[in-house]
Image (cartoon, grey):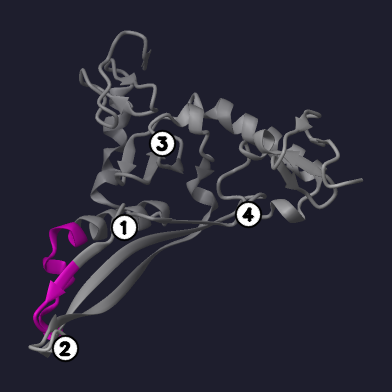
Amino acid sequence: MGFFDKKYCDVCGEKIGLLGNRKLEDGNLCKECASKLSPFFSDRKSSTVEEIKQQLAYREENRQQLAGFRATRIIGDRMKVMVDELGNRFIVTSSNDILKANPDIISISDVISCNLDLKMEDTELKQEDAQGKEVSYNPPRYCYSYNFFIEISVRNPWFSQIRFRLNSSDIEMGSRRQSMVHPEYNMEYRKYQQMADEIVAVLSGQPTARGMAASVINQMAQNGSWVCSCGMTNTGKFCQNCGAPRDGRDRIR
């Protein structure tokens, strides 16, 4: 077969357009079917057609289960960990429309470990001397950048690790002297440190003050709480996650 011969998806049977082929170990996959795979899945090229079909069946079942997912705790701003405390499960997503994004539902009991990987980089700040050349300050000055990465190891047939950056942009801070830098004094740093601590505590099964709210959540189910289309459980007039108003079309619990 030549390079420009027509190819067909071995999963859905549709013709694959130019540059739309995604190779499998024993066949071809169209980009539409590939887009339905788990975002945490990374072994496509070594997967068989049958394995991809099995995963897509799992993904469709996951989509159906999302209709009953009730996010009672949301940690993060851009990339969020949304926890269904009553169902003892969670999802990781950057989307406000979880039914469309179809993030994988993971049982907290399937979490092997959850850790913070804090990355720090330093860059020396320079100044121009009388000749216009860049030279070091005396004493040297540095700019520091921090990034909070969450690493979650899980038991799942299609992936074993979830890794994502919690902060949406680098947390930067400078100092006149290296000895003066203390990131805990930075409000943004503390914000993401607290988020990371909460995620690790919740997914590692460690008790937190918010974990004591389970009985309150049960009471909410009996007092007219409603579920927004984004998946968040609310009691007020507006969704505390995406800000959408309660319009009568949301599910009443």
Q: Are marks 3 and 4 in contact (CB under 8 Å)?
A: no
Q: Secondary structure at mark 4?
A: loop
Q: Are marks 2 and 3 in contact (CB under 8 Å)?
A: no
Q: Nearer the viewer, residue 3 or 192?
A: 3
Q: Position of residue 118 (x, y in %)?
A: 34, 68
Identify which amino acid the numbered label 4 is placed on. Ser
> Which of the 4 image quadrants contains residue 176?
bottom left
Q: CA distance from mark 2 to mark 4?
A: 44 Å
Kindly identify which residue carries mark 2.
136
Q: Are marks 1 and 2 in contact (CB under 8 Å)?
A: no
Disc number placed over residue 95 in the picture, else none:
3
The residue under the point 29% across, 10% down is: 247
The residue under the point 68% across, 35% down is: 33
Q: CA distance from mark 1 to mark 3?
A: 19 Å
Task: Give, as a single range, the part of the protein colored magenta.
Answer: 173-190
Q: Position of residue 8 (x, y in %)?
A: 82, 34
Q: Secondary structure at mark 2?
A: strand
Quadrant of the snapshot with the N terminus? top right
Disc number placed over residue 196 in the picture, else none:
1
Kindly identify which residue carries mark 4.
42
